[in-house]
Amino acid sequence: MDFKTSNEETKTGIYLMQEGNEEPFNIRLHLAKDILTIQEQDVICVSGEPFYSSERTVTIRRQTIGGFGLSIKGGAEHKIPVVISKISKEQKAELSGLLFIGDGILQINGINVRSYRHEEVVQVLRNAGEEVTLTVSFLKKTPAFLKLPLCEDCTSFSGIPSDQSSGTSSPLCDSGLHLNYHPNNTDTLSCSSWPTSSGLRWEKRWVDLRLIPLLHSRLSQYMPGSDVCRKNAFQVIAVDGVCSGVVQFPAAEDCVDWLQAIVGNISGLTKHNVKKINRNFPVNQQIIYMGWVEDKEQDSVQDRMYSPKFLALRGSSLFKFSAPPVTTWDWTRAEKSFTVYEIMSKILKDNDLLDKRRHVFSVQTESGEDMFFSVELECELLIWEKAFQMATFLEVERIQSKTYACIMESHLMGLTIDFSMGFVCFDAASKAVLWRYKFSQLKGSSDDGKSKIKFLFQNPDSKSIEAKELEFSNLFAVLHCIHAFFAAKVACLDPMFVESQGTATTPGIPPLSGISCNSQTPKLKYAT
């Protein structure tokens, strides 16, 4: 059951919730722009000042025709009390505000029946006499397998075996406690409620169970720490650790719809929050991206393959945190940080995936170490990809050149990668330039995976290929830097990229993302 409003930021629907090993129960979800509200059904007193009570006492009289007009389900065999599952149409008016579908029967005429099996409760009620006093309490987490109606008006009443029939009762079927029920019965019931005031009336309502602030919240379809994806289900975890519980949906389409809506709202809040934070940072220290990922453990134990981490692209660095940074001091306490133009990111294709996680990207560090991160939706991959491209381009544009120490033919040299000039090699001692080539003259390269790079440049006059072999102490940092400078040169020629630069919200700084989880924006044409 799902109700959409014209505003895509809000949704309401009734689904199932599972907590731990408990049976799923009905809950109502309400998604607003900045908060996810999870509600459960409860019964509250609405006469006078509203208040909650764990127990109520109601006295009803058995009628000659029609009996009690109630049906029950459940029992101790299902680890719950017997639950009122139906109230006959004729009894609804009299019992309105006193008894409700979903009320668990705790006592019958003072007899504690909490631990009674279904058939035992049926027998106690049949032998209870003409007047029965029930102590009841609304079961807010009634197991979904009982299939109770969500509202009183949704009920219907049908005769199930009574004490005058030979049928037997079942805890999963409605046992009718009507005794010779007849639809034309007009006798009334004598009703009183607890406390003793006859003026008290009760009402079944949806009440808040949990409120999940969406800013910096994360969600997951996977079992914690694993690559096992839940079927049509996910949970939302607030930044303070409060968990929604596992929300279950009847179909994959419903699950994806809610995932996209929640991720979209989180993304919108993050973008707004980043815009505010960036007012306090200089232009070269602006935040380009913030978001949760699942980090694949390098030395994973068997029961934990992934851990939640918070990534941020800010200025020249990629930061990895265990929690979102809030204060300036938090930014100095990152688990790890990397220079964006000395690392490389890649989205894994289906045949490159490491396990059952579907949306994964890798980051290769300046030391050659590969890190793998998982997100929930494809749109989150696109947001990351575009943000990383933006961060790399902006930093290359800012620094313009980068020089690395190297060795050529046993001599200490320096190699400068310059955004305008290309490659420049010079003697470290005399600073004399030995050779220079434009980016367009690089026709190929190879490396030994350890320290050496062999460049193949084309001579502009003779058109012949000239090989230059250099040795570096930080091979991967150099390779990634060259790649970043090439990507930035290509980006300058990309009309889509140029246009996105021109529509930036802050001079020189692009928006957090031009891709949302509710739209299909084309990717940038160049790859990183």
Image (spheres, rainbow, N blue to C red):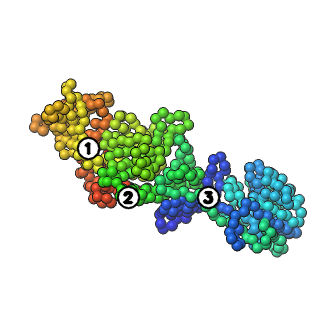
Which element carries disc 1, helix, strand or loop?
helix
Residue 273 is marked as: none
Res. 99 visible in picture? yes
Disc 3 from disc 2: Cα separation? 32 Å
Crowd rating for badge 1 (residues with CA inside 10 Å; few <14, some 14–19, many 20+): many
What residue sits right under mark 1 in the picture? Answer: 485
Q: In which image quadrant can residue 126 be found? A: bottom right
Instruction: Please report whichever mark, 3 or 1, sits nearer to the chain's N-terminal start.
Output: 3
- Does 181 sit above or below residue 497? below
The amino acid beneath tag 1 is Phe
Left or right, 189 with reference to 503: right
- Does 285 sit above or below residue 468? below
The amino acid beneath tag 3 is Leu
Quarter of the rendering occupied by the N terminus: bottom right
What residue sits right under mark 2 in the picture? Answer: 275
Instruction: Please report whichever mark, 2 or 1, sits nearer to the chain's N-terminal start.
Output: 2
Disc 3 from disc 1: Cα separation? 52 Å
Of the pair 357 and 289, the residue shown nearer to us: 289
